[in-house]
Image: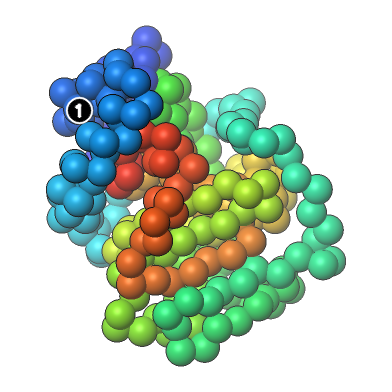
Amino acid sequence: MNYLKLPAHFNRRQLIQLLGMSGMGYLLNSCSNEFTAKVGDLTEPLNRSFGELLVKPQQLIPEFPKSSIDPKALLLNSYNGTPEIDRNEYRLTIDGEVKFPMELNLKALKQLPQTSIIMQHVCVEGWAAIVQWGGFRLRDLARMVQPKDSAKYVLFQSADKYTESWDLASALHPQTLLADRLNGQSLPARNGAPLRLATPIKLGYKLSKWVTKVTFVSQIPQGGKGYWEEQGYEWFGGI
């Protein structure tokens, strides 16, 4: 996998075509919700398996230089507004099929090894922005809770009720972060503070903001693929 630099004129349909989903993407976007749901149910297992095969757990995606950062880029895509979160009361819950479920406040999370990545945030609607995310690796959090062998997927819940689900390999990729900094500064509330997902291997709709809960599971529950995925978006969402 390599990073993807999109021409400015790309729209959502062209992006889906570029990602190798043109036939099904066109079909699902052109048909009724009922038909979309039926086709999605039939193709989802293949779609999921194919996406998971593409993940190379240790392969790093090349970063962009600092000179490429767009400081004015505003990555705003909340479907339900910006939630109000009391940082003093905030807790990140990590549970599910793990040996040591935890609830951690921001002070405890700051004790995890910190890192950053300059990457291109790619939206399925066709725009992209190069930004620097800073925070901690999700894999370091996983080491603390120790997922059981049965864990195959990770569910994310957010303060604005947004939901997502990922394959375990993508969640544990060394460049998958829970970020609390944007371009070297504290992450603004509108961009997902206190914590949001950031990685160069997923499209923007997979990168949940205002994350409050991380759950390791053996199977994705019925209706739990994710907010947009339940409306017909492709599940894996990889780049």
The image shows residue 171, relative to residue 5, as above or below, that is below
**For the image shown, how many numbered marks are present on the structure?**
1
x 32%, y 35%: residue: 37
Asked whether the viewer can see residue 110, the reply is no
In-front residue for pair 114/192: 192
Relative image position of residue 64 (x, y in whole percent):
40, 39
The image shows residue 112, relative to residue 79, as above or below, that is below
The image shows residue 149, relative to residue 16, as above or below, that is below
Q: Quadrant of the C terminus?
A: top left
**Extreme residue toward the top, this view:** 9
Q: Quadrant of residue 77?
A: top right
The image shows residue 135, relative to residue 131, as above or below, that is below
Q: Is residue 80 left or right of residue 89?
A: left
In-front residue for pair 130/224: 224
Q: Amino acid at mark 1?
A: Met
Colour mapping used in the image: rainbow
Relative image position of residue 113 (x, y in whole percent):
54, 73
Task: Quickly name the residue at label 1.
Answer: 24
**Extreme residue toward the bottom, this view:** 99
Dot 1: element: helix
Q: Quadrant of residue 103?
A: bottom right
In-front residue for pair 115/200: 200
x 40%, y 41%: residue: 229
Q: Callout 1 environment at 10 Å: few (<14), some (14 to 19), or many (20+)?
A: some
x 73%, y 39%: residue: 82
Relative image position of residue 238 (x, y in whole percent):
30, 43
